[in-house]
Image (cartoon, rainbow, N blue to C red):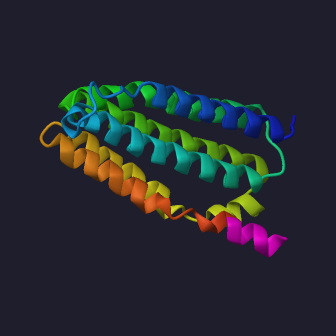
Amino acid sequence: MTMSKTRLEAFSDGVLAIIITIMVLELRIPEGATLEALRPVVPAFISYVLSFVFLGIYWSNHHHLIQAVQHVNGRILWANLHLMFWLSLTPATTAWIGETHFATLPVAVYGIVLLMAAVAYLILTLSLLAEHGRDSLIANALGRDFKGKISVVFYVVGILLAYWIPVLSVAIYASVAIMWLVPDRRIERTLRQQG
């Protein structure tokens, strides 16, 4: 049975808005009015900025992805919930790496959450492709998805590296975000060509 995509999109937008709100509420106010008072909150702020960018990237790409489909089914709804589950762990892992000043285990766990969110997004795209077919608009828009696949490799490297140089792991995670900062234009381009 197929369903309208509007409820899935509205639900996902709401979940992501709540996740970002929870994250910002986790930020601590400096205990003083000097530059020195800012020093203890810098790691938490850096982790917040990185996570905010990741969530923004997911929101933007999810929006484009859903625009390229006609309908959804139960399998797609569950795949989307799977993605929302991993993204909902972002506030906890963000707070953990910030409060521990990028310690080994928190950085590795943060990477695992990023990796699992990327895998969940891949599962969502595969579910959409299964429903709409290999010759569909979404299939044409997604193409080979090189950035998605290389992101998974970077996350695995970052997770493993966290046990030796956690700050370098965070730099690898940030490089994935930078790679995705330029929005995935494949879907926009395909939609324009079809319109």
**Rendering quarter of residue 96:** top left
Residue at figure coordinates x 71%, y 37% from the top left: 76
Q: Nearer the viewer, residue 50 or 168?
A: 50
- Predominant SS of the magenta segment: helix
Q: Quadrant of the C terminus?
A: bottom right
Q: Residue at position x 45%, y 55% from top?
A: 149
Q: Is residue 116 above or below residue 139?
A: above
Q: In the rendered image, is residue 44 in sight?
A: yes
Q: Position of residue 179 (x, y in %)?
A: 42, 61
80, above or below 131, in the image: above
Q: Is residue 73 above or below residue 178?
A: above
The single residue placed furthest to the front in the displayed view is: 33
Left or right: residue 127 versus residue 153 is right
Which quarter of the rendered picture does the N terminus lie within?
top right
Position of residue 20 in the picture relative to residue 33 (left or right): right
Residue 182, magenta (yes or no): no
In the displayed image of the protein, which residue is found farthest to the left?
164
How many numbered tags mark residues here? 0
- Coordinates of residue 82 in the picture (x, y in percent): 58, 30
Measured as percent of width and height from the top left, residue 52 is found at 47, 42
- Which residue lies at the image location 62% right of the left edge and 34% below the top edge? 17
121 sits left or right of 113 in the view: right
Q: Position of residue 93 (x, y in %)?
A: 37, 28
Residue drawn 49% across the image and 38% down it: 117
Is residue 118 visible in the rendered image? The answer is: no
Give the residues drawn in magenta, as a range. Answer: 188-195
